Image (cartoon, rainbow, N blue to C red):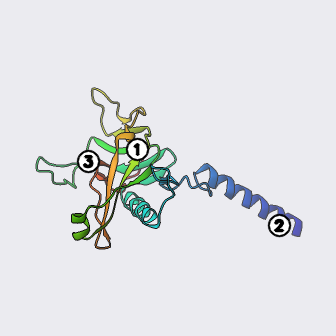
Amino acid sequence: MAILGSIRSVLFIILVSLFSVACGGGASGDDDVQVSETRSDGEDLSDDDEAAAEFLRSELMKYYVKTPDGWTTQMQQYNVLGEVMPDRVPVELFRQHRELSFALSPKPLDESMKLNGVDYRAEARFKDSPVRYYHTEAGYEWPQGWDDWSDGLFAMTVVALERRNGTWLEPNNHLFNGIKPTMAIP
């Protein structure tokens, strides 16, 4: 009986491990936003660089969830004044990036920045990654549901990071136009 219990325990551990890997789990770090281990100039990340990377990761996690197909954010419907219309579902409901990966490029501070309390500035340049959209209805150029993956032009996506008086400023970029999904992702 003890042998049978041990075999069951081993099988359970194997099944849980296989399920974890199949669902994107495991220790590979694939379930996290990826940050280059060096700065764009090839230098090792400083403590300030690592703090900036962690801040940007945490900001992205406010807007995206990791799914088996990539990082997904839910879009919102806006009126002509740019105000969110929470009772409306937009035609373009979800945006999904296959990968979220960036490298930091710290920027020098001039005297006026320092006088204004800026103690760190950098650009986070995102690695190019495919993107696709989920549409609630068909249009001329897209089907209802997920469209095909396309080049995301992420290589041109740059997020400015600045810490002023010890506080990180909220990034302003199209990556942060959505919300963390509140609806089931198809």
Mark nearest the camera among 3 and 1 is 1
Residue 17 % position (x, y): 68, 56
Answer above or below: position of 146 versus 10. above
Taking 125 as reference, is 83 left or right? left
Looking at the rendered structure, the kind of residue marked 1 is: Gln
* Residue 66: percent from left, percent from top: 47, 53
Res. 5 mark: 2
The residue most toward the left is 81
- x 33%, y 58%: residue: 108
Which residue extends farthest bottom? 165
Neighbor class of circle 3 (other Cα within 10 Å; few <14, some 14-19, many 20+) is: few
Separation (CA) of disc 3 from disc 2: 52 Å
Up-down relation of residue 155 to residue 85 (above or below):
above
Crowd rating for badge 1 (residues with CA inside 10 Å; few <14, some 14–19, many 20+): many
Q: Which residue is mark 3?
A: 89
Q: Identify the image quadrant of residue 139.
A: top left
Residue 59 drawn at (x, y percent): 37, 61
Residue sitting nearer the eye, 33 or 10: 33
Q: Of the residues tagged 1 and 2, which is closer to the observer?
A: 1
Callout 2: helix, strand or loop? helix
* Quadrant that contains the C terminus: top left
Nearer-N-terminus badge (1/2) = 2
> Could you tell me which residue is drawn at 31 percent across and 40 percent down?
136
Element marked by disc 3 = loop
| Helix, strand or loop status at disc 1 | strand
What label does residue 96 carry, if any?
1
The image quarter containing residue 128 is: top left
Looking at the picture, which amino acid does disc 2 mark?
Gly
Label 2 crowd (10 A; few <14 / some 14-19 / many >=20) = few
Q: Residue at x 51, y 57 (%)?
A: 44
Of the image marks 3 and 1, the number of the one nearer the N terminus: 3
